[in-house]
Structure formats: structure tokens, C-alpha cells
Image (cartoon, rainbow, N blue to C red):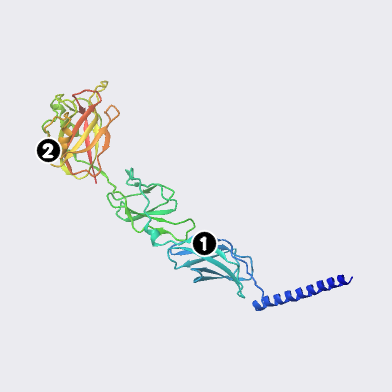
Amino acid sequence: MKNLIYILFGCILSVIMYSCQKDNHATDFRNFLDGHEIVYTGAAGPAVIQPGNLEVGLKWKASSDPSITKYVVYWNNRADSQIVNINTRTDSVRTVIKGLAEYTYSFTIYSYDAKGNKSIPTEVNNVKVYGPVYTSKLLNRGYDAANPYVLNEDGSLVLNFITPDTININTVIKYTNGAGAASTATLLPNVKTITLPSYKLASPIQYQSSYIPERGAIDTFTVADYDTFPRVYSFVQCDKSLFRENPLPNDVGTYEGQTSVSKLWDGTTEPQNYPNIFHSDGSQRLPHHITFDLGKVYDNLGRIEETGRYEGSNDRYHNPLDFQVWGIADITNAATTLSSSDPGWEAEAKSKGWVLLKECLRSDDGQAPMKFDLISNPPPVRYIRIRVMKVYSGDSNYSNMSELTFWNKQ
């Protein structure tokens, strides 16, 4: 019994001592906080980043805590900050931080009440700010190099572009309309073509594209300089009244006087019957050639149309299916010494200054008028040599044509 009394007394003493010690700790804690408790305001919600040009927009869900009077956004290790005062209750809070460098930032958002109590932090990391370095890497939207434009008969012009980057906003096009007035048009990113209602031929067209760095960006970035669209040419028919026969050595002869080379520019527009055609005399095997004078130098000869012979029920006409168009500006010393059928003829022709403007291939019977575009950026041309390689009839000696028409690009 005596031992039991000692044990009970010891337990009571321990409880008393623990209680005193706990009270002392609580007093020390309150002393540390200067007699105040820690109060946290409601924290800002997750932030949405809105990148810009040397600035950034931050938007976050407002806290439901009614005591909040402001938010403070810190960055640069809290060396910089921006205060967003709250005067009315809203579902979201937004601020734009300006004067930033082109860099990747981290931001911390705190909410405060009127007593200075603040929330736990809301961190916003990897915030990219864009600027001149980003702009310097932008390129104007590309055009369709294979088919850059279509010039319509009504004077309108269709420009063809390729699919842009997904962050392209628009492309502004500057041009001169048919009345000579400066005009602009805007190409949207979801279309590949734009039609200019009227256009002054051969006048320059420039274009400049704008982009956003990310979806939701608050600023648009424009390529520093305009690019120039490929020159738009019109085709002006060469004056056939100036054309003249100009045979050179080794040119093929004509079948008779009525079927001379000059029949090729008599103005006919449809396949003709004999004798209203050019017809070779059969003295030279294919390939053979003829030479004539356009009457003036053309600086950008761009197109030829060839029309074959029509002979009713006779399907053995000698219309070219494969013929070459050669050109030169000055006929002096341009005559070739080799026969056109000689394997070395082409090399000799080039050495004399002749330029191959086009090899024209047809897959029909060679009758109907057919146009062929000549090489881009040709040299000046006045004299033409037509070298017939193959005819529809399969004949090895004869060739015939109804008409040749040429156009200069300007």
C-alpha cells in the first residue's frame, strides 16, 4: 500500500510539471510573434501566361477571400514587383508587366489584405518574353514558286501562296491598281490565294507578314521588311508584219513557192490546207531547221504558239510533235556548218551564240494551235530557228506547219 501511494504521488507530480512546461512554451511562441497569430489570405489561382513584345500579361483566378485588397507580383528574385489593387470583386485578375527584357522569367504572386497579411505564394515559371531577337528570325509567308500568279483577262490578278505557319496572323500586300493608285490587300492565314481586282501590269508587288509567338499572345510581331513578289508579266504579241524570211546555210528548202516559210505568219488562226502552209521540200532528213527574222530585238521573248496542218481525211500530215525553238540577237557569224541531223549540230549552234529557248513536245496529232512558254530570263532575241525533230506521220524527211505566233513578256 505504501508503495502504491508513492507511485500515485509521482504521477500527479509529473502531470503538474508537464503542464507548467507547456504553458511556458506557449508563452514563448506568443512572445516570438509579438502576441499575434499568423493569418493567411486566400491565394491567387493558377495563372495564364499571355506573352508579348518586351512585356507579358498574367491572368489568374481571383481568390474568394473578401478581405483581399491587392495582389503583388514579384520577379527578378523579388527585386522588381508590380501592385494590382482590387477595388471591385471580379472572377479573375489581370495585369500587364511592361519594360521587360527578352528573357525567360519566373513570377511569384501574393494576395494581401488591408492589415498586410499575405497569402502563400503562387508561382508562375518559364514565362517567355519576346522581342527583337524573335522578330529578326521571322520570314514573310512564302509564295507558290511553281505557280506564283494567274493574270486574268478582266485585269484581275490572283496571287498564290503556300500554307503558312500556324501562328501567322496575316500578310499585307502592297500593289498598284489598274488606275495607277497605291492599294493594299490582306491575305488571311486560312487561305492560299488572294485576288487583286485590278492591277497595273509590271508594277511591283510587295508583301509583309505578321505573327504571334504563341496562342494567347497580347502582341503581334511583324517581319521587319517587305519582300517583293515575282514580277507579273503580260504577254504582248510580236508584230508579224515585221517578220521576214532569213534562210541560212543548211536550212531545209520549201516544197514549192506557195509553201514558203512566210506562210507561217500570214495571220491564220486555224489549221490550214495545202498550199496555205509551210511545207519542207524533203531534201534533208529530220531533224531539219528553218530560220527567220522577227524584225526587231525582243528582250523577254516568252511564248510561242504553233499550229499544224489540216488535210481532211488524210491523217498522214507531217505536223511536228517534237520541235526546238532557238534564238539569237545578231545573225552575224551565226550560220552553222553542220547538217541539223548531225550529232554535233547542237554543240556547234551553241558555240555560234544560239540559245535553246524551248523544246516543244506534243502528244496529239499536231493540228490544233498549242502554246508553249519559253525559258525564263531569256537573252535578247531577234532571229528564230525552228528545228523539227519528229512529225506525226513518222516521215523522215517532210515537215509542215500552218502558223507560228510569238509573244514578248513585259
Image mark count: 2
> Which numbered tag is attached to residue 334?
2
Residue that sits furthest to the right in the current view: 1
> Which numbered tag is attached to residue 97?
none
Query: Is 359 displayed left or right of 105 in the figure?
Result: left
Q: Position of residue 339 (x, y in %)?
A: 14, 29
Foreground mark, 2 or 1, reads: 1
Q: CA distance from mark 2 to mark 1?
A: 75 Å
Q: Residues within 10 Å of mark 1 (few under 14, many from 20)?
A: few
Q: Position of residue 214 (x, y in %)?
A: 47, 56
Q: Could you tell me which residue is drawn at 67 percent across and 74 percent down?
A: 37
Q: Secondary structure at mark 2?
A: loop
Q: Secondary structure at mark 1?
A: strand
Which one is nearer the viewer's eye here, 280 or 81? Answer: 81
Could you tell me the amino acid type at mark 1?
Asn
Could you tell me the amino acid type at mark 2?
Ala
Q: Is residue 312 above or below residue 101?
A: above
Q: Which residue is mark 1?
A: 125
Residue 267 appears in which quarter of the rendering? top left
- Dot placed on the residue nearer the N-terminal end, 2 or 1: 1
Q: Can you see residue 33? A: no
Q: Is residue 257 above or below residue 160?
A: above
Q: Is residue 240 above or below residue 192?
A: above
Which one is nearer the viewer's eye here, 120 or 216? Answer: 120
Q: Position of residue 78 (x, y in %)?
A: 51, 70
Which one is nearer the viewer's eye here, 42 or 120? Answer: 120
Which one is nearer the viewer's eye here, 112 or 315? Answer: 112
Residue 249 appears in which quarter of the rendering? top left
Q: Can you see residue 257? A: yes
Q: Position of residue 6 (x, y in %)?
A: 84, 73
